[in-house]
């Protein structure tokens, strides 16, 4: 059905203004960003197709500029808007973590890490550097490839902690497989880094496993 044939209170913009953004589906919110459809396909149909093809709104927003280039109906302007939404979310979370201790809202830390790492196709090891108030100083992606004690160098992590004058860190890496269960190598690496950073009086607060669909805290599992 063309949008002009739909009841006014079913149109995404009118529905949002009357009932608030939470009342809209992922496809309806996406349709507001896209604004127009393609030949033979209205904007809601295009939005729903994109959500389905990319495995959800998160998959679409994290797919990157190159993947979006090949989608019919997404020109440069629409691709830029989608990438801008992700970057705005990252910056909003970063600002929140810079202003409040991470323990005030641990879910924000997980969301922040998921936005950065969740949809990467290769394993990435990252470190969140925190000040003495446990507020965000920086997030750095430090190593790529399968995690092990031989591929992640404690000396490099220690040097970056000193560079940022960090008092604490949160370790993080992604599992492209989607499995959030820490491996034996993950646990061993955590203890190695914990011991190395302890010599510098830098605490390891957590090691978070990140996937496209969620995160798991090793500290909450009693493994840190």
Image (spheres, rainbow, N blue to C red):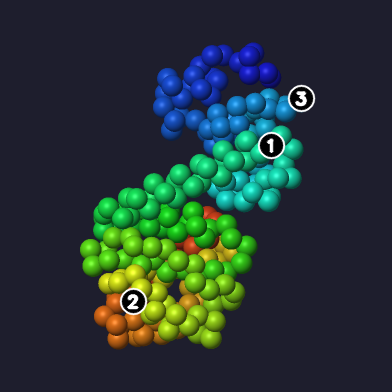
Task: Identify the residue at the far front of this view.
Answer: 163
Question: Which residue is the site of mark 1?
Answer: 75
From the image, state whether disc 2 or disc 1 is nearer to you: 2
Q: Which mark is residue 65?
A: none
Rendered-image quadrant of the C terminus: bottom left
Of pointers 2 and 1, the one earlier in the residue sequence: 1
- Of residues 128 and 163, the one drawn nearer to the viewer in this rendering: 163
Q: Is residue 209 visible?
A: no
The quadrant holding residue 98 is bottom left
Report the residue at 74% width, 45% height from top: 70
Cα separation, mark 3 vs mark 2, equals 58 Å
Instruction: Count every numbered label the image shows and give the total.
Output: 3
Residue 54 visible (yes or no): yes
- Kindly check if marks 3 and 2 are in contact, taking CB atoms under 8 A apart as contact: no
Per the image, the residue denoted by label 3 is: 40
Specify the quadrant of the image occupied by residue 53: top right
Image quarter of the N terminus: top right
Q: Work out whether 219 lies above or below 68.
A: below
Q: Which marked residue is nearer to the observer: mark 3 or mark 2?
A: 2
| Image coords of residue 82 (percent x, y) | 57, 41
Q: Which residue is mark 2?
A: 162
């Amino acid at each position: 059905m063309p949008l002009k044939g739909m009841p006014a209170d079913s149109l995404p913009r009118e529905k949002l203004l009357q009932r608030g953004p939470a009342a809209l589906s992922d496809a309806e919110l996406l349709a507001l960003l896209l604004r127009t459809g393609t030949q033979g396909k209205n904007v809601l149909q295009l939005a729903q197709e994109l959500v389905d093809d990319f495995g959800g709104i998160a998959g679409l927003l994290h797919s990157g500029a190159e993947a979006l280039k090949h989608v019919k109906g997404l020109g440069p302007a629409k691709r830029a808007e989608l990438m801008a939404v992700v970057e705005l979310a990252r910056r909003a979370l970063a600002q929140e973590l810079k202003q409040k201790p991470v323990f005030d809202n641990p879910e924000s830390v997980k969301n922040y890490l998921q936005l950065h790492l969740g949809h990467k196709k290769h394993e990435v090891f990252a470190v969140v550097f925190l000040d003495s108030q446990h507020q965000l100083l920086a997030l750095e992606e430090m190593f790529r490839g399968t995690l092990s004690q031989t591929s992640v160098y404690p000396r490099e992590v220690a040097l970056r902690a000193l560079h940022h004058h960090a008092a604490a860190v949160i370790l993080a890496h992604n599992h492209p497989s989607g499995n959030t269960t820490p491996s034996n190598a993950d646990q061993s690496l955590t203890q190695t880094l914990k011991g190395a950073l302890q010599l510098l009086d830098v605490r390891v607060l957590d090691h978070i496993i990140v996937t496209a669909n969620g995160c798991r805290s090793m500290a909450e599992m009693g493994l840190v």
